[in-house]
Image (tube, rainbow, N blue to C red):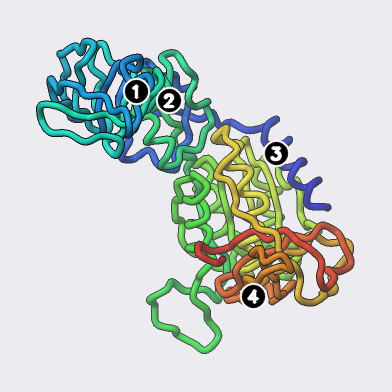
Amino acid sequence: MPVNKALKTFLTSYSKHHHFTPKTEHVNLHNAANRVLAQDFISSMDIPPFNKSAMDGYAVIATNTQNTSKNNPLSLEVIATASAGDATTCKISSGQTVAIATGARIPKGADAVVMVEDTDGDKKTVKIFKEVKNGKNIITQGEDIKAGQLLLTSGTWLRPQNIGLIASVGVESVEVFCKPKVAVFSTGSELVEPGAKLSTNAVLYDSNRYMLSGMIRECGGEPIDLGICQDDPTSIQETLKNAQQYDLVVISGGSSVGEKDYVPNIINQAGAPGLIVHGVAMRPGSPTALGIVDGKPIIATPGYPVASFFAFHTFGRPLLYTMLKTKGLPQATIIAKMTSGIKLREDMQTFVRVNLTPTTDPKGLLCYKAEPVSATAASLLSTLTGPDGVVIVNNKPRLIKGQNVEVLLLRVGST
């Protein structure tokens, strides 16, 4: 099944059959990063809550400075000094000023600030060398945020800047959606836990479960590790039954059509509606299986690590975002020019891993070149950790040398 159709079929079936209703909780702002806001957030106050100085200088009455210049300075009496945080009570009259620091409250009577660079004076008097207009160098009350203003909508993925915005209006905790609990287990008699002694020369360390758990956390879920299942139908059935107490089940391995690939049939027999999709036109990742069992969604990813990664990226990520009622975290992409062509399967969505090299165009502007690393190699995890990004190609026979492509960045600092 084509990727877009498979995803639509899966999400539509989930919407029809699911038993998941996201609960909410209040969390302190220290713990709110990468959580999803569960209600619209409206400011209860103006920010700033008072008129304040935008810089160090002198608070003045603007009309007093009319026609002032270096050749015609204005001499004013300094009646007070205002620092940020001071509860300023004084009021200036014509011929007076207050020495003021950046962020300090504008004293009564003042309607402009002259930069300290345009003055010369001491604690008692100051000469002003520049005319200023009403409101100059003043940040007015509510200029940033107004009381009653909608700041963030429900479903916002909270980033550090969002948390700073919430804190700026004096709120210390926020209501967010609880993290969906995601059961994760691997299947395969050849697998052992990292750290275990390799008993034979035919066993492998299980990497997929740890990778998938990290991806689940990254997408807003809470992974529940159910370990490794041997290639035994009864063991897999029991583990799947146990997993169904959680909100989502992600299985690694056993999803293909081999003799010991039991997972699709087990999903289909576990409950209604059962298996929805088995086999997706994507490379790597074509043996992916998707199901809903008694209202619980199940994603069975292939055993090969790269295929497992892209299967979850394609189906697990959007499902978790749907469960959390969010558009999720924006994905960083850049445009780059292919350094060489590469032949692809026209009937497949292909994940082409690439390395990026910065360069300049004829006008001297920064641009990037994308060198293809692999379009297959489903078992080689290094083709995910080494390359800088991936080009997702939808049903095209090839990429052409010199072609501009959109690269999804796989790692921070890759550019």
Residue receiving disc 1: 48
Q: Nearer the viewer, residue 370 or 320?
A: 370
Where's the C terminus, which quadrant? bottom right
How crowded pointer 3 is (Cα within 10 Å; few <14, some 14-19, many 20+) is rated as some
Whole-number angstrom distance, CA of label 1 to CA of label 2: 7 Å
The amino acid beneath tag 3 is Leu
Looking at the rendered structure, the secondary structure element under dot 1 is loop
Q: Do the residues labelled 1 and 2 touch (CB within 8 Å)?
A: yes
Q: In which quarter of the image is residue 334?
A: bottom right
How crowded pointer 2 is (Cα within 10 Å; few <14, some 14-19, many 20+) is rated as few
The image's mark for residue 379 is 4
Q: Where's residue 9, x and y in %?
A: 77, 41
Whole-number angstrom distance, CA of label 3 to CA of label 2: 40 Å
Q: Are marks 2 and 4 in contact (CB under 8 Å)?
A: no
Residue receiving disc 3: 11
Residue depicted at 31% across the width and 34% down the height: 115
Q: Where's residue 27, x and y in %?
A: 34, 33
